[in-house]
Image: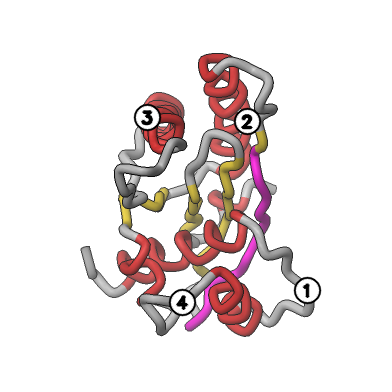
Amino acid sequence: MNISNATNYKTWLGIDPGLAILGWAILQDLGSNSPCLVDYGTIETPKDLSTARRLVEIEKDLICLVREFQPDGIAVEMPFFSREIKAAGGVIQALGIVSLVSYREINIEPIFLHQSSWKCHLGNGRANKQEVGEMVKRLFDLEKLPINDSVDAIAIAYAGLSGVRNEIH
């Protein structure tokens, strides 16, 4: 069953962008206080591929995700870069792929959230990765959760869904 076709439930895709590792998560709003965590994971691209080939891999995997889950909304972290970050170019290009796939495949323009913004929805705008993981575990009553980019994606999807639900833009 395609979950987005269920009675007025809203499905959200959260994305923690990256060229090497892109985290993703699918949440479904069941109308209760806490949405349901449907699925999550990462898209990883080999470092030995050219940037263009890595972007094609991200595009293909994102197309599969949006076609399978048909999200009603997409929330993406808008990263902050200092001048010393070498990975910034790849992340920015991955953001372009996310926007392209979202609009071309399902006619959605993603909501971009700064890190402190999506972390505030968990209760601490300065939480580190371990603290985000603990908050996500409690929020979704999970026993085990890998501390990787998918955890941030879960929190990003939660912030997007919560912000829209509460009309916070």
Q: Earlier in the sequence, mark 4 or mark 2?
A: 2
What segment carries the magenta color? 33-43
Q: Earlier in the sequence, mark 3 or mark 4?
A: 3
**Residue placed under numbered mark 1 in the picture:** 144
Q: CA distance from mark 4 to mark 2?
A: 29 Å
Q: CA distance from mark 2 to mark 3?
A: 14 Å
Q: Quadrant of residue 66?
A: top right
Q: Earlier in the sequence, mark 4 or mark 1?
A: 4
Amino acid on which disc 1 is placed: Lys
Kind of element beneath mark 1: loop
Q: Is residue 73 visible?
A: no
For disc 1, the neighbor class at 10 Å (few under 14, some 14 to 19, many from 20) is: few
Amino acid on which disc 3 is placed: Gly
| Residue 60 belongs to magenta span | no
Kind of element beneath mark 3: helix
Q: Is residue 52 above or below residue 78?
A: above
Query: In this image, 63 relative to 1: left or right?
Result: left
Q: Quadrant of the C terminus?
A: bottom left
Q: Quadrant of residue 25?
A: bottom right
Amino acid on which disc 4 is placed: Ala
**Residue 96 - label:** 3
Kind of element beneath mark 4: loop
Q: Residue at x 56, y 79 (%)?
A: 131
**Residue placed under numbered mark 4 in the picture:** 127
Front-most of 24 and 33? 24
Q: Is residue 13 above or below residue 92?
A: below
Q: State the image coordinates of residue 81 (x, y, percent, origin top left).
A: 33, 48
